[in-house]
Image: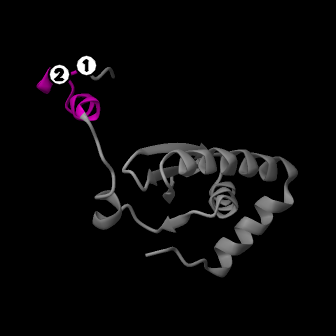
Amino acid sequence: MAETKTETETAAQDSAAQDPKDERTAAKLAKRIGAFAKEHGGAEAQLAYVGERGTRIVLVGQDGGWGDLFATSHAVAEAAVEKAGVTVHEDFDGEFAAKVKTGPYEWTRMAGMQLGGPKNKA
């Protein structure tokens, strides 16, 4: 289900659009999101707020490919996905997460040395 914007979110996005630096950052992120979407036959996104550090933009392509970008604020992330024209999900729920295709690299990386993959370094 696509995200619906509240008045607070719209105001935050409008404030990002008013700051020239944030606007440039959102435009650069939107360009990268668009490139990802083109490479993967389209894309959908989920925004994950990670505190003062900003917001993670998780992208899932129509072919199951995935990636992420990092925005300095939630408002910048919202502006970027809107400019890119991708569907945004509120949660990384079962249906959306099921679109992600992982390969041997991801499985060994996640399991680390338990499956003979690289050691997870602390």
Q: Identify the residue under disc 1.
A: 118
Number of dots carrying numbers? 2
Name the residue located 71 percent from the left edge and 67 percent from the top edge.
12
Task: Check disc 2 and report its element: helix, strand or loop.
Answer: helix
- Res 109 → quadrant: top left
Is 101 located above or below residue 12 in the figure?
A: above
For label 1, the SS is loop
Q: Are marks 2 and 1 in contact (CB under 8 Å)?
A: yes
Residue 59 seen in the current view: yes
User: What residue is shown with label 2?
Assistant: 113
Which is nearer the N-term, disc 2 or disc 1?
2
**Residue drawn at (26%, 36%) of the image:** 103
**Span shown in magenta:** 104-118
Left or right placement of residue 63 versus residue 112 in this view: right
Name the foreground residue: 27 vs 122.
Answer: 27
- Using the rendered image of the protein, determine whether residue 53 is visible from the camera's viewpoint: no
Q: Position of residue 94 (x, y in %)?
A: 28, 64
Q: Identify the image quadrant of the N terminus.
A: bottom left
Q: Can you tell which mark lies on residue 2?
A: none
Q: Which quadrant of the rendered structure holds the C terminus? A: top left
The type of residue carrying mark 2 is Met
Query: Up-down: is 64 above or below 83?
Result: above
Q: Is residue 64 left or right of residue 86?
A: left
10 Å neighbourhood of mark 1: few (<14), some, or many (≥20)?
some
**Applied colour scheme:** one colour
Q: Magenta-highlighted stretch: main secondary structure? A: helix
| Residue 98: percent from left, percent from top | 28, 58
